[in-house]
């Protein structure tokens, strides 16, 4: 697909034909299955100061917590009980807390005790760390590059190395070579983000041959520098625009796993998941973090916990799948 074609899909008055085509391709490559991945938010302690994120180090109003290893393994066991197949271990960036050895041991325990596949989402880490975790049995790594626009990336990530190559794209390439399935993605509507840069983001997903692509609207957090600025974006913060990006990603990478994200459901609590699943998405990531920790993990305000581990909310999710002719698939 050309840049011009992508740009015109993003800006056309309506996108019904695009969504229909994305559904067709999604069906051809993925059938009617939806993968559920259990998200475990290990800790809200973060050393970074990303300008958009509510969990940034300098925000004093975050309830900081860190889960114990036994609690984490218990969450993974719940994922197995619910037939999820995969758990995602995500945390604020903190190497002191999540050392190479500790994560390696957690991976081995989760594999041995629950049989779940493991996706890591622990931020920017060294080649040695990710190699050790691969050797311990990790399957996938999620690291959003957030934007291909280097000057925008540098401005909103003061803690990232200001190298010539995008540090996260460099890490994704290293991990692909190490044998990981790699996932990335961007936020849509970051102040200062341009439509041309989003076109570049989408083309970069294809260039990197990503296995998984997570896309969500940028949501203002009032206790962050970006949330307090009134700088605008050319890129709309809307469910429609987000779903156009899901659909275009599906056309560019027909086999990718594309989650309908929590940020989309937060922006549109009533229709978010249906819209996501009818514009090319095939994955859902229910939050399995214990309820008493969750309020600590507010990367943006009002983050809804799409489903709790309770059976009733999972039933509601499955009812939505049913209405759409889809069903849970283990993996
Ligand atoms: N709005 C939307 N998404 C956000 N993230 C972090 N802060 C925000 C925000 N204010 C996303 C980033 C990050 C992921 C874990 O959450 O894309 O990679």
Image (cartoon, rainbow, N blue to C red):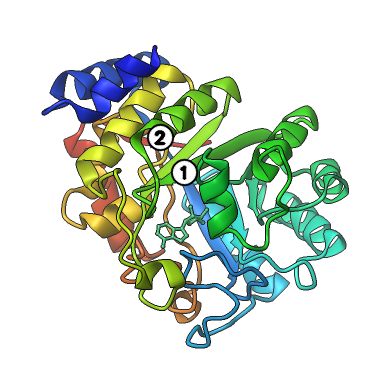
Q: Percent position (x, y) of residue 156?
A: 53, 58
Q: Is mark 2 within 8 Å of ligand 1?
A: no
Q: Nearer the viewer, residue 95 or 311?
A: 95
Q: For the residue labelled by badge 2, is the local secondary structure a helix, a strand or a loop? A: helix
Residue situated in front as seen by the camera: 73 or 7:
7
* 1 or 2: tag closer to the N-terminus: 1
Residue at the location (55% across, 57% down)?
A: 155
Locate residue 217, reporting x and y percent.
34, 50
Disc 1 target residue: 186
Is the residue under label 2 in contact with that under label 1 (CB below 8 Å)? yes
Would residue 192 be visible to someone looking at this image? yes
Q: Does residue 298 appear anywhere in the picture?
A: no
Q: Nearer the viewer, residue 78 or 203?
A: 203
Q: Which residue is mark 2?
A: 198
State which quadrant residue 328 falls in: top left
Q: Is residue 280 left or right of residue 291?
A: left
């Amino acid at each position: 697909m050309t840049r011009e074609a992508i740009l015109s899909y993003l800006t056309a008055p309506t996108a019904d034909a695009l969504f229909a085509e994305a559904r067709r391709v999604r069906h051809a490559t993925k059938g009617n299955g939806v993968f559920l991945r259990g998200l475990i938010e290990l800790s809200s302690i973060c050393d970074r100061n990303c300008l958009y994120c509510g969990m940034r180090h300098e925000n004093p109003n975050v309830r900081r917590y860190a889960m114990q290893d036994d609690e984490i393994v218990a969450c993974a066991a719940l994922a197995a009980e619910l037939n999820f197949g995969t758990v995602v271990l995500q945390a604020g960036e903190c190497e002191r807390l999540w050392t190479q050895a500790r994560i390696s041991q957690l991976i081995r325990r989760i594999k041995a005790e629950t049989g779940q596949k493991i996706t890591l989402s622990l931020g920017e880490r060294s080649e040695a760390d990710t190699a050790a975790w691969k050797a311990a049995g990790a399957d996938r790594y999620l690291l959003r590059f957030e934007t291909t626009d280097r000057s925008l990336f540098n401005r909103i990530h003061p803690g990232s190395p200001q190298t010539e190559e995008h540090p996260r794209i460099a890490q994704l390439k290293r991990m692909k070579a190490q044998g990981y399935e790699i996932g990335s993605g961007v936020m849509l509507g970051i102040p200062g983000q341009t439509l041309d840069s989003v076109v570049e983001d989408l083309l970069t997903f294809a260039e990197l041959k990503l296995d998984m692509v997570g896309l969500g609207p940028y949501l203002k957090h009032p206790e962050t520098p970006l949330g307090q600025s009134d700088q605008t974006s050319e890129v709309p913060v809307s469910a429609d625009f987000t779903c156009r990006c899901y659909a275009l990603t599906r056309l560019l990478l027909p086999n990718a796993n594309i989650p309908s994200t929590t940020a989309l459901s937060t922006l549109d609590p009533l229709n978010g998941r249906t819209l996501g699943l009818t514009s090319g998405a095939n994955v859902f990531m229910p939050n399995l973090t214990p309820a008493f920790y969750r309020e600590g993990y507010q990367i943006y305000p009002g983050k809804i916990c799409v489903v709790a581990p309770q059976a009733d909310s999972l039933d509601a999710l499955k009812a939505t799948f049913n209405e759409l002719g889809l069903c849970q698939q283990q993996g």
